[in-house]
Amino acid sequence: MMSELRLLDKTFSPYLNADEIALRVKHLAEDLERDYASRKVLFVSVLNGAFMFTSDLMKALDLSLEISFIKVSSYEGMASTGKVKEIIGLKNSVEGRHVIILEDIVDTGTTLLKIDEIFKSKNPASLEICTLLFKKSEFKGNTPPKYVGFEIPNKFVVGYGLDYDESGRNLSELYQLKE
Ligand code: IMP
Ligand code: MG
């Protein structure tokens, strides 16, 4: 049973439990296996938030693939700063590859836009986004992510890799800020 959670100065309510997340991750893996059956995929996971999602999704996937990790930052505390720094950590060659970016959450899409721009300039054969969570109402971009775990309302969430001021990333479940 999930119960209310206190992190730093805020209280969070149970939102999605580990079984619900695992089931959705399994279905995402099935979608990807179907769409990429004959292609080798380069998964690019955006740290830190996507680490748990990446781990579970990769274990659920039966595909020929490579995994790479990158870092960007655009968020401090609970409000989007909109400031995206450079991408660091990309060692793999992207040209001619089928690339899927793995994100924990797409909110306004500022982060995604920047990543998308940088990757497109490296001439991949194809480029898609797979995100665990999508705050659709807040999205300001033109192209929404193709693979979405859960569309969620505009409420702050924490757990399963996502943090509130660096706390809560280790939780197996997702919690939502209590009003
Ligand atoms: P965007 O650039 O506005 O799309 O914000 C994306 C980034 O903001 C994500 O990668 C997260 O790090 C962070 N973020 C957005 N919403 C939440 C949330 O509800 N909880 C935790 N982090 C969030
Ligand atoms: Mg993130």
Image: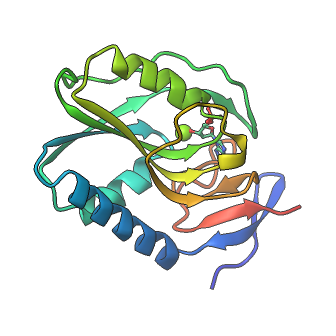
- Which quadrant of the render holds ligand 1? top right
Q: Residue furthest right?
A: 179
Q: Is residue 174 above or below residue 107?
A: below
Query: Would you identify the image quadrant in which residue 98 lies?
Result: top left
- The residue lying at 72 percent from left, 47 percent from top is 137
Q: Nearest the camera: 21 or 121?
A: 121
Q: Is residue 172 above or below residue 170?
A: below
The C terminus: image quadrant: bottom right
Q: How many marks?
A: 0
The percent coordinates of residue 71 (x first, y second) are 44, 29
Q: Is residue 106 above or below residue 159?
A: above
Q: Nearest the camera: 161 or 61?
A: 61
The percent coordinates of residue 109 (x first, y second) are 60, 33
The N terminus: image quadrant: bottom right
- The residue lying at 34 percent from left, 13 percent from top is 121
The percent coordinates of residue 64 (x first, y second) are 12, 50
